[in-house]
Image (cartoon, rainbow, N blue to C red):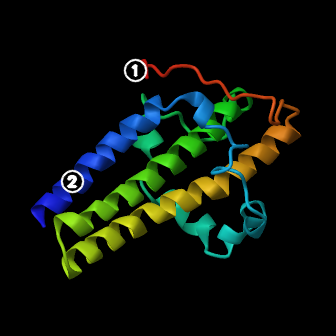
Amino acid sequence: MKRCLGYLAVISVVFFFLGRVFPKTWLQPDRWLFRCRSFEQNGRIYEKLGIRFWHNKLPDMSRILPCLVPPKQLNNGYKERLPEMIQETCAAELTHLLAAVAGLWCLHLWPGAGGITVAAVFALINMPFILIQRYNRPRFLRLQKRCGLETGEDFRYETKKSCCGL
């Protein structure tokens, strides 16, 4: 069990930092993985899960490590930050998805019911964070369009380096 939990802690940290350095061309909202699906109804399906009530209660790396993760508040200057905020939803979704999939290695580290339980719980822990990104991204894209900012497949979201250089 200790090996499995240690492994999960390590991959969580590793994937967080990989999310900071993924090539920005991978993190585009028009890419297959990040595109809004019709069943999601532009994020409204997540409201049926009560996401509006619980999404701000979960840990947010932009509050924990603001130097590494851009803030997601829609306060002064948000129009200029919208492309970066949209791209950040892609990075966070990919990070949590990769961590959940890599968590399946616990089935090898701890064969049997223990490994199955830990891998399933780890996937379930990552799922709300994936849902939050899938909920926020279409909302940010609609806001970007309303603000008259450029969008579409020809537009590439570029971000500035953070204060930590990542």
Image spot of residue 141 (x, y percent): 76, 44
Residue 150 vertical position relative to residue 95 in the rendered view, above or below: above
In this view, the residue farthest toward the left is 2
Residue 27 vertical position relative to residue 52 in the rendered view, above or below: above
Q: Who's the residue at 24% across and 64% down the image?
A: 106
Quarter where residue 143 is shown: top right
Number of other residues with Cα within 10 Å of mark 1, as a class: few under 14, some 14 to 19, many 20 or more? few
Give the mark, 1 or 2, whose residue is nearer the N terminus.
2
Asked which secondary structure carries label 2, the reply is helix
Q: Who's the residue at 65% across and 68% down the image?
A: 46
Note whether residue 87 is visible: yes
Q: Viewed as shown, does residue 2 lie left or right of 65? A: left
Quarter where residue 158 is shown: top right
Number of other residues with Cα within 10 Å of mark 2, as a class: few under 14, some 14 to 19, many 20 or more? some
Quadrant where the C terminus sits is top left
Quarter where residue 157 is shown: top right
Residue 62 is marked as: none
Q: Nearer the viewer, residue 21 or 44?
A: 21
Image spot of residue 4 (x, y percent): 18, 61
Label 2: which residue? 7
Q: Nearer the viewer, residue 101 or 123?
A: 101
Label 1: which residue? 164
Residue type at mark 1: give it.
Answer: Cys
Q: Who's the residue at 66% across and 36% down the image?
A: 75
Asked which secondary structure carries label 1, the reply is loop
Residue type at mark 2: give it.
Answer: Tyr
Q: Who's the residue at 58% across and 29% down the image?
A: 24
Residue 108 vertical position relative to residue 113 in the rendered view, above or below: above
Image spot of residue 39 (x, y percent): 75, 70
> For the residues marked 1 and 2, what is the alpha-carbon distance in whole angstroms?
26 Å
Quadrant where the N terminus sits is bottom left
Looking at the image, how many numbered discs can be counted on the residues?
2
